[in-house]
Amino acid sequence: MDRQEIEDLIARVALQDRAAFEQLYDRVSAKLFGVCLRVLNSRAAAEDAMQDTFVKIWNNADRYNSNGLSPMTWLITIARNTAIDRLRARKKGHQNLDSPGFELVAPGPTPEQSAVNASEAAKLAGCLETLEGDRGQAIRGAYLDGETYADLAVRFNVPLNTMRTWLRRGLIALRECMSL
């Protein structure tokens, strides 16, 4: 799916077009679910975060600004922030997202999907290793472990803006590496 197609769908969602919303969901939900699952480490919690994510997308599609950046970045940011908010709430004890009881689990990926996912995960791990210095650890902390930029800046003893630059440049390098 190309950038323009996603931008067009977001623009139509901003006009409350339900068909466009369904198409957008079909095109991006797997990737956004992966983001939520990685942050929350619980399928049920990730499914709840996904629902919240798409409610936010529906309600805020008119705020998306096509400025040359990838629309997937905007969508992934919404999913990641939603998942991090849930993770923080769970850590603070405001919500008990892992309460005992029945948990309905959707069927998992097919063996083919598992193989593809494992291959992509290995490629991503290799790409993370190519980043200079602590950049790989910072990206893992921010995007896989849900650490805030401020926490990472303190952990790596760098100014907050330097941490933002590390992360932005690191993501650009990862995108280039993954596209090879």
Image: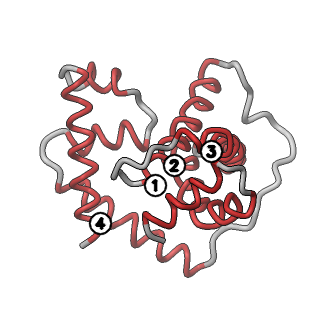
Count neighbours of disc 4 (C-alpha within 10 A) and say few if under 14, some if 14 to 19, many if 20 or more: some
Q: Which residue is mark 3?
A: 57
Mark 2 and mark 3 in contact (Cβ < 8 Å)? yes
Residue lying at 46% horizontally and 35% vertically, measured from the top left:
146
Secondary structure under the numbered disc 1 in the rendered image: helix
Q: Mark 1 against mark 4, which lies toward the viewer? A: 1
Q: Mark 4 against mark 2, which lies toward the viewer? A: 2
Residue 113, image quadrant:
bottom right
Q: Which residue is mark 2?
A: 75
Q: Which residue is mark 1?
A: 72
Count neighbours of disc 2 (C-alpha within 10 A) and say few if under 14, some if 14 to 19, many if 20 or more: many
Is residue 64 shown left or right of residue 123? right
Query: Residue 55 location in percent, x, y?
Result: 70, 42
Residue lying at 71% horizontally and 62% vertically, measured from the top left:
22
Between 157 and 32, which is closer to the camera in this rendering?
A: 32
Residue 149, image quadrant:
top left
Q: Which residue is mark 4?
A: 178
Mark 2 and mark 1 in contact (Cβ < 8 Å)? yes
Q: Which residue extends farthest left?
A: 132
- The answer for how far apart the CA atoms under marks 4 and 2 are is 19 Å
Is residue 149 shown left or right of residue 19? left
Query: Tag 2: residue type?
Result: Leu
Query: Residue 154 location in percent, x, y?
Result: 27, 19
* Upstream in sequence: badge 1 or badge 4: 1
- The answer for how far apart the CA atoms under marks 1 and 4 are is 15 Å
Residue lying at 35% horizontally and 66% vertically, measured from the top left:
122
Total label count?
Answer: 4
Picture layout, residue 30 above or below residue 73 = below
